[in-house]
């Protein structure tokens, strides 16, 4: 079964805002074997809709969507699930799954804590 992981960012009309997400995608794509895509929920291309359409056209059968959000606010509770449902209807050949936001993953919390502690001039206890 062919698989893709979609990194989903919010989106912005400001190219400078998008640059860190594009750098992250490029760095990870070079290091990972998985078919890794970057998409935006709104205001930017590639959109989630165009990304899923591209994956469906290329024969991808399963895709997981990993939101690059700190928490599940309104967008992740309502807007993105509605987008995913519409995409499931439009592309029934692709099994789409929405994952919890990256900010809820324990490894993300630890990485963020390390950055904050470093900025405060402290070391985290191990």
Image: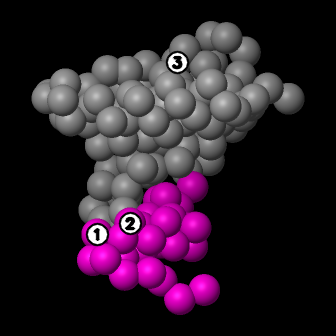
In which quarter of the view is residue 41 placed?
A: top left
Point out the frontmost of discs 3 and 2: 2
**Label 1 sits on residue:** 119
Q: What span is colored magenta in the figure?
A: 99-126
Q: Residue at x 60, y 27 (%)?
A: 29
- Say if 90 sits above or below 63 in the image: above
- Check contact, mark 1 vs mark 3: CB within 8 A: no
* Residue at disc 2, secondary structure: helix
**Is residue 78 visible in the rendered structure shown here?**
yes
Helix, strand or loop at label 1? It is: helix
Numbered mark located on residue 25 in the image: none
Q: Residue furthest top?
A: 57
Of all residues, the one furthest to the left in this rendering is 14
Q: Main secondary structure of the magenta part?
A: helix
Between discs 1 and 3, the one toward the N terminus? 3
Quickly name the residue at label 2: 115
Find out whether the residues at labels 1 and 2 contact each other: C-beta distance under 8 Å: yes
Instruction: Estimate the x, y position of residue 123 in percent, counting from the top left.
Output: 44, 81
Give the position of the C terminus as an image quadrant: bottom right
User: Does residue 47 appear to the left or right of 17 in the view shown?
Assistant: right
Farthest residue in the front direction? 121
**Residue 62 lies in what quarter of the image?**
top right
Tell me the residue that label 3 is attached to.
53
Image quadrant containing the N terminus? top right
| Percent x, y of residue 68 | 42, 50
- Left/right placement of residue 52 relative to residue 10 reads right
Residue 109 part of the magenta segment: yes
Residue name at image x 55 percent, y 43 percent: 65
Q: Is label 1 or label 3 in front?
A: 1
CA distance for labels 1 and 3: 42 Å
Drawn side of residue 33 relative to residue 1, left or right:
left
């Amino acid at each position: 079964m062919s698989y893709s992981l979609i990194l989903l960012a919010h989106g912005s009309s400001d190219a400078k805002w998008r640059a860190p997400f594009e750098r992250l995608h490029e760095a990870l794509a070079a290091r990972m074997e998985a078919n890794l895509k970057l998409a935006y929920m709104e205001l930017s291309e590639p959109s989630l809709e165009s990304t899923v359409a591209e994956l469906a056209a290329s024969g991808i059968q399963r895709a997981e969507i990993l939101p690059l959000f700190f928490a599940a606010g309104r967008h992740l509770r309502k807007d993105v699930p509605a987008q995913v449902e519409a995409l499931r209807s439009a592309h029934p050949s692709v099994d789409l799954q929405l994952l919890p936001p990256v900010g809820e993953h324990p490894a993300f919390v630890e990485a963020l804590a390390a950055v904050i502690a470093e900025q405060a001039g402290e070391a985290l206890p191990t």
